[in-house]
Amino acid sequence: MSTVLITGASGGIGYELARLFARDHQSLILVARSGDRLAQVANELQALGVHVHTYALDLAAPTAPKSLFEQVQSAGLIVDILVNNAGFGALGEFAHMSEEHILGQIQLNIVALTESTRLFLPSMLARRSGRIMNVASTAGFQPGPLMAVYYATKAYVISFSEAIANEVRDSGVTVTCFCPGPTDTGFAKRAGNEKSRVFKQFGAMSAERVALDGYRALMEGRTLAISGVQNWVVAQSTRFAPRKMVTAISRWVSETA
């Protein structure tokens, strides 16, 4: 039986991943901002007969990743699988976006993910066993006008994860970068783009289906996985289309339908 740490576990993809691991009888360490919601999730999953530890932390706070690591260590818990799922986006032109939203996205989507990987990876390498999944997005395959910072942070996650996966090859540890497309979670409402074309005209996959794709990719040790055939086609097409066209289309889908 393994112990799985999942950030952003109170809803959406993180919650669905937690359910999948619980059904597989894995112990869970769940992290999210809302302590009340975490308690509800813990009660639900403990009913399946698994151990659940919860930590109510805002990982966008600069000291939070290290604090989480130290608390996990103090509790004597060994993390076999790390899922860096927490993240958020914000819609709007960069010049008019608040400093809080700009730096908050970078802190959570990049810094916290990188720091958590740095902290938990060495012990996995020492045991020659472990899995890490960094949740990026199909947004990371192209520039994203009106969500410039978010798209850029996800490009970082893809590049970083693929590089680390190569560094730890043959070590017994795998690193998977998982790229969902538009997904029916609370992400769009928080980002402010729930009325954009990407959600209104193209639709979103269910969080349950997306989580299952991610779970399978992680357990198979795949380096890069994209959820959904349509999302795979879109991500691949950006490699061949003119960059200005890709950027223009990216803006169009982010605009209000």
Image (tube, helix red, strand yellow):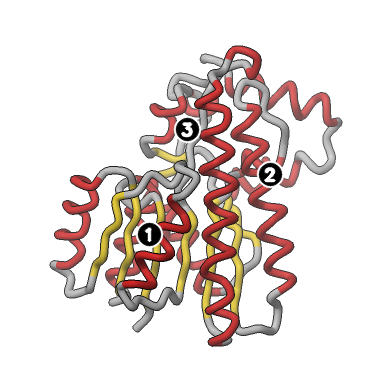
Indicate the secondary structure of the residue bearing disc 2. helix
Mark toward the start of the polypeptide (1 vs 2) = 1
Which is more foreground, mark 3 or mark 1?
A: 1
- For disc 1, the neighbor class at 10 Å (few under 14, some 14 to 19, many from 20) is many
Name the residue carrying label 2: 155
The residue at the point 69 percent across, 56 percent down is: 160
Left/right of residue 107 with respect to residue 247 in the rendered view: left
Q: Which residue is mark 1?
A: 17
Pinpoint residue 35: horizontal percent, then vertical percent: 23, 47
Q: Residue at x 72, y 32 (%)?
A: 143
Q: Residue at x 48, y 23 (%)?
A: 193
Q: Position of residue 18 (x, y in %)?
A: 33, 61
The residue closer to the viewer here, 6 or 181, is 6
Query: In this figure, which residue is indicated by the disc labeled 3?
Result: 203
Q: Amino acid at mark 3?
A: Gly
On the question of residue 168 being in view, the answer is yes
Outermost residue, bottom side: 127
In this rendering, the answer to whether 60 lies above or below 193 is: below
